[in-house]
Image (cartoon, helix red, strand yellow):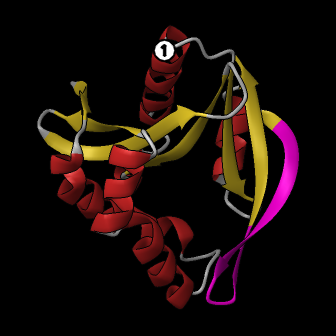
């Protein structure tokens, strides 16, 4: 039985453990190992996650199978009324392709709709096969963007949106 747990800064170690378990297999065919290490430190260090939760008001949720954490997601408002941003959604590779990702995404959609969202937006690496999952879930490409994240690395993303 799957259960969703809201988080606080006290849950950062769980998010970091999930990141270590999920991120490398997800991006190993797309990014160089050095870039993966750089991005994990940039976005998932204790200070980065603390800032996301405590200062930027990103809402994190952890998905559990019984009591074992198997995935997480985060979202927040944007500067545009009604548009919410899905910052992160990651699922243990052993659970992918079984409807669990849909369950986690549907949970996020229910939560943001309760908060007044009319559009959910996300960024996905142009070479990430997850793009096809998002399309299947009703997202479409809104625009493309390239983001310099430092250290000579560039994030090449599609910005995708779904009307809620």
| Residue 70 falls within the magenta-colored stretch | no
Q: Quadrant of the N terminus?
A: top left
Q: Position of residue 146 (x, y in %)?
A: 80, 66
The range drawn in magenta is 141-155
> Most prominent secondary structure in the magenta stretch?
strand
Quadrant of the frame with the C terminus? top right
Outermost residue to the left: 67
Disc 1 packing (10 Å; few <14; some 14–19; many ≥20): few
Please provide percent x and percent y for residue 89. Answer: 48, 45
In the displayed structure, 56 sits above or below 17; it is above
Residue at image x 48%, y 14%?
110
The residue where tag 1 is placed is: 110
Please give the name of the residue rendered at 54% of the width and 46% of the height, measured from the top-left corner.
Answer: 87
- Which residue is located at x 68 percent, y 49 percent? 123
Is 145 located above or below residue 98 in the figure?
A: below
Q: Position of residue 129 (x, y in %)?
A: 67, 55
59, 67: nearer the viewer:
59
Q: In the visual, does 148 lie left or right of 85?
A: right
Quadrant in the picture for residue 161: top right
């Amino acid at each position: 039985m799957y259960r969703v747990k809201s988080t606080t800064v006290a849950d950062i170690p769980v998010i970091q453990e999930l990141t270590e378990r999920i991120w490398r297999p997800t991006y190993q065919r797309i990014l160089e190992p050095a870039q993966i290490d750089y991005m994990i430190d940039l976005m998932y260090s204790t200070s980065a996650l603390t800032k996301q939760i405590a200062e930027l008001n990103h809402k994190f949720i952890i998905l559990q199978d019984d009591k074992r954490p198997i995935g997480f997601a985060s979202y927040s408002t944007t500067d545009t009324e009604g548009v919410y941003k899905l910052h992160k959604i990651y699922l243990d590779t052993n659970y992918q392709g079984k409807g669990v990702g849909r369950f986690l995404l549907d949970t996020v959609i229910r939560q943001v709709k309760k908060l007044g969202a009319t559009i959910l937006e996300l960024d996905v690496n142009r070479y990430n096969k997850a793009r096809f999952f998002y399309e299947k879930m009703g997202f479409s490409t809104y625009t493309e963007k390239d983001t310099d994240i430092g250290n000579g690395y560039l994030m090449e993303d599609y910005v995708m949106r779904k009307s809620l």
